[in-house]
Image (cartoon, helix red, strand yellow):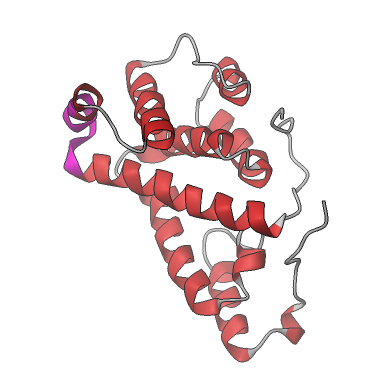
Amino acid sequence: MEDRLGPIPFAQMSASQQVAAQAVIDGPRGALYGPFVPLIRSPELMAAAQRMGEYLRYRSAIGTRLTELAILVTAREWSQQVEWAIHAPIAREYGIAEEVIGAIAARRRPDGLLADEALVVEFCLQLHRRQRVDDATYAAALAAFGEHGVVDLMGINGYYTFLAMVMNAAQTAVPASAAPPLPE
């Protein structure tokens, strides 16, 4: 697959693209990569998405371990190789077991999850596959994470779905990764 919206050299970007790109480079990501490569074509959209993503990825109310788990479920549901390549190693670093990562990659429900992990996986799968969350799962998430956490969990699923759509349509090049690619 050819990358439809590949990198633009910084010197060839418009002034507004350079400002948006520099904001990503100067932030916690440290570089313009992944979804921001195609999104730079719309600098205002990219800037807004970048700010939302920075909050959800680095400061969500459910914490980094569960955020990374939700990202993996979203990447798998959208067969998004770039998200997977970036986030599977991060999830591992934050304590998501290799068996869990492998099960998600294989579209199996993971065994041996901690209670909060099982709840995040169930919530995310329902949201992606049914476009809603049943009352029991919602109540359990509310009890575990509070309203702030539930809204952030919904936001993580929505934000990474948006990125998956952008990268799937743009056929964004997959970076080298310690994670094996998602099976078809």
Residue 34 visible in the current orientation? no
Q: Is residue 71 left or right of residue 66?
A: right
| 140 magenta-colored | yes
Where in the figure is residue 62, as x and y percent of width and height?
Answer: 32, 38
Query: At 57% from the left edge and 33% from the top edge, which residue is drawn?
Result: 76
Tell me which secondary structure the magenta stretch mostly adopts. Answer: helix
Disc count in the image?
0
Q: In the displayed structure, would residue 152 be above or below residue 12?
A: above
Q: Is residue 1 left or right of residue 83?
A: right
**Residue with the most extreme right position:** 2
| 114 magenta-colored | no
Query: At 63% from the left edge and 20% from the top edge, which residue is drawn?
Result: 106
Query: At 75% from the left edge and 75% from the top edge, which residue is drawn?
Result: 8
Query: At 54% from the left edge and 19% from the top edge, which residue is drawn?
Result: 100
**Residue with the most extreme bottom position:** 15
Where in the figure is residue 99, as x and y percent of width and height?
Answer: 59, 15
Quadrant of the rendered image containing residue 154:
top left
Q: Which residues are magenta?
A: 139-147
Residue 13 visible in the current orientation? yes
Where in the figure is residue 161, as x and y percent of width and height?
Answer: 49, 48
For the residue pair 37 and 169, the one nearer the viewer reads as 169
Quadrant location of the C terminus in the rendered image: top right
Quadrant of the rendered image containing residue 126:
top left
